[in-house]
């Protein structure tokens, strides 16, 4: 009987927050080109422990800088998987001697992979380089709606027509702009990757989705500020196939990521869309130099708290690197939540990764830790806490090899190309099953400047009282 009651408790916890008609994001990757003075025509995104039958949706934007315009193309390598890039889901425009391109593609995974590398090589024209890339692995997608693919140039508005009810529509927007955010109030969730370039402008990429209630034509859009005439938007739709329940007790609703470049601004910012009151906004950052001040551009009374134990500094070859993790439990819902951080005079933000997370009940300040290493010990007060770590490192080897260990799942990866080094940030998360001392870690070939921080939060699992009759 004790075993039965324990199983019933698990079922209650697992199913209490289920939400229908919502494909589940199981992997995230963002990769902007952060320094257009040091151009690169190759973009990588890597996903870890992908599952056969799931679908990877990814968008990429690229451009040429000057000279004779050409046709920008993509090539893919790194696995036996075959990406599909519908012709109508590519926007391509000649503008002021440049060729801008934005494309949305997908992969239906034929096999499971411990690491799936998506490599996109941009070619054609004069000095081609990519500006942003974002990939997501989804569980619960069905057949692709081949008639839904659409594109538009010199605008961030698009009509997508679905053939069936309850399809999910994806869009990818690109612009040289101060900010990109959702343009549709009924968009259910967003992910954004932001790239800040030196000399070539601030390139932004934005990926979003919505559920289409019926077979119809739907207006999709992004909102931009201080735009240049480089706007493009692409979209397509999938049918849904038995979308899984939202994970319990914790679900990452959406992500926003920003990457700065050497010589750029001391601040970083990006926007979450349609956030929900009661959810927790987790803000993690890696910096070059020591954090001196913080300005989070609060939404009304929403003022994040930075946990002191997550901040630390370490010097490598005369350069100082640091991390911090902050959070706020949202008192109100917001159509746009701007997460910004100002490192202060001198230092600057290398990478900023922000998450809206549901199911967190409290913050365990005693779990906060900083380590100048690829391994970091942290201590949780209770079992069943949700733990996240932010890791920053630099290396100059080709391709991404930045992966979490100790059963942490990668929930965000972003790269920063600069004149001094190649900075990378990785966020990993997991439910820490046992209280007491635990370990977070990552592996990186050629690790040169490791810094990492951890922070844990209470969940419904950690708040359940333990009774002797429930021991298995």
Image (cartoon, rainbow, N blue to C red):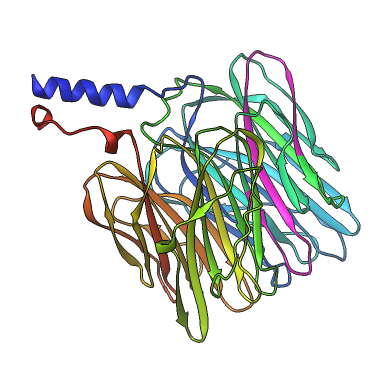
**Quarter of the rendering containing residue 420:** bottom right
Q: Does residue 350 show up?
A: yes
> Which quadrant would the N terminus be assigned to in this image?
top left
Task: Decide which of 471, 208 is in the foreground and name it.
Answer: 471
Expressed as whole percent of the image width and height from the top left, the position of residue 389 reads: 40, 56
Report x, y in % for residue 230. Answer: 83, 50
- Main SS, magenta region, reads strand
Q: How many marks?
A: 0
Above or below, comparing residue 374 to residue 75 in the picture: below
In the picture, measured across the screen, residue 204 lies left or right of residue 49, that is right
Q: 206 above or below 24?
A: below
Tell me where residue 88 appears, x and y as whole percent: 73, 34
Residue 106, percent from left and from top: 57, 38
Q: Specify the quadrant that holds the C terminus.
A: top left
Q: The magenta stretch spans which residues?
A: 193-222
Residue that lies at the very extreme toward the right in this rendered image: 96
Picture layout, residue 318 above or below residue 14: below
Instruction: Based on the picture, tell me whether residue 167 belongs to the magenta stretch.
Output: no
Asked if the magenta segment contains residue 203, the reply would be yes
Determine the residue positioned at 72% across, 30% down: 184
State the residue lying farthest toward the front. 301
Residue 422, image quadrant: bottom right
- Report the front residue among 272 and 79: 272
Position of residue 89 in the picture relative to residue 448 (left or right): right
The quadrant holding residue 453 is bottom left
Q: Is residue 33 visible?
A: no
Residue drawn at x 62%, y 53% as measured from the top left? 75
Which of these two is toward me, 166 or 290?
290
């Amino acid at each position: 009987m004790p075993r039965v009651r324990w199983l019933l408790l698990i079922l209650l916890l697992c199913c209490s927050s289920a939400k229908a008609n919502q494909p589940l994001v199981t992997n995230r990757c963002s990769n902007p080109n952060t320094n257009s003075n040091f151009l690169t025509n190759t973009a990588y995104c890597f996903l870890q422990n992908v599952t056969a039958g799931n679908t990877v949706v990814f968008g990429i934007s690229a451009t040429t800088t000057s000279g004779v315009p050409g046709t920008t193309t993509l090539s893919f390598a790194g696995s036996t998987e075959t990406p599909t890039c519908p012709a109508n889901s590519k926007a391509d425009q000649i503008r002021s001697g440049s060729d801008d391109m934005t494309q949305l593609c997908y992969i239906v995974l034929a096999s499971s992979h411990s690491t799936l590398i998506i490599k996109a090589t941009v070619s054609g024209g004069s000095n081609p380089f990519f500006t942003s890339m974002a990939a997501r692995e989804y569980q619960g997608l069905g057949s692709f709606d081949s008639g839904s693919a659409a594109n538009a140039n010199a605008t961030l508005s698009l009509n997508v027509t679905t053939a069936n009810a309850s399809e999910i529509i994806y869009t990818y927007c690109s612009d040289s702009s101060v900010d990109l955010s959702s343009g549709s109030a009924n968009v259910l969730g967003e992910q954004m990757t932001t790239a800040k370039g030196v000399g070539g402008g601030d390139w932004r990429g934005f990926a979003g989705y919505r559920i289409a209630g019926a077979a119809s034509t739907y207006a999709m859009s992004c909102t931009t500020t201080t735009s240049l005439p480089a706007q493009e938007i692409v979209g397509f739709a999938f049918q849904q196939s038995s979308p899984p329940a939202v994970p319990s007790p914790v679900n990452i609703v959406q992500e926003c990521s920003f990457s700065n470049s050497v010589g750029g601004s001391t601040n970083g910012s990006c926007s979450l869309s349609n956030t929900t009151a009661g959810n927790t906004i987790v803000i993690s950052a890696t910096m070059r130099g020591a954090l001196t001040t913080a300005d989070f551009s609060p939404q009304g009374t929403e003022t994040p708290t930075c946990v002191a134990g997550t901040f630390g500094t370490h010097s490598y070859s005369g350069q100082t690197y640091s991390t911090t993790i902050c959070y706020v439990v949202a008192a109100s819902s917001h159509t746009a939540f701007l997460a910004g951080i100002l490192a202060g005079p001198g230092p600057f933000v290398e990478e900023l990764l922000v998450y809206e997370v549901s199911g967190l009940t409290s913050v365990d300040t005693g779990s906060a830790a900083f380590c100048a290493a690829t391994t970091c010990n942290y201590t949780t007060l209770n079992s069943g806490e949700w733990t996240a770590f932010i890791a920053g490192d630099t290396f100059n080897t080709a391709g991404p090899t930045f992966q979490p260990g100790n059963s942490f799942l990668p929930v965000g990866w972003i790269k920063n190309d600069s004149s001094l080094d190649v900075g990378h940030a990785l966020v990993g998360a997991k439910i820490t099953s046992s209280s007491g001392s635990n370990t977070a870690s990552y592996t990186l070939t050629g690790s040169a400047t490791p810094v990492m921080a951890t922070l844990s939060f209470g969940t419904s699992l950690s708040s359940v009282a333990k009774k002797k009759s429930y021991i298995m």
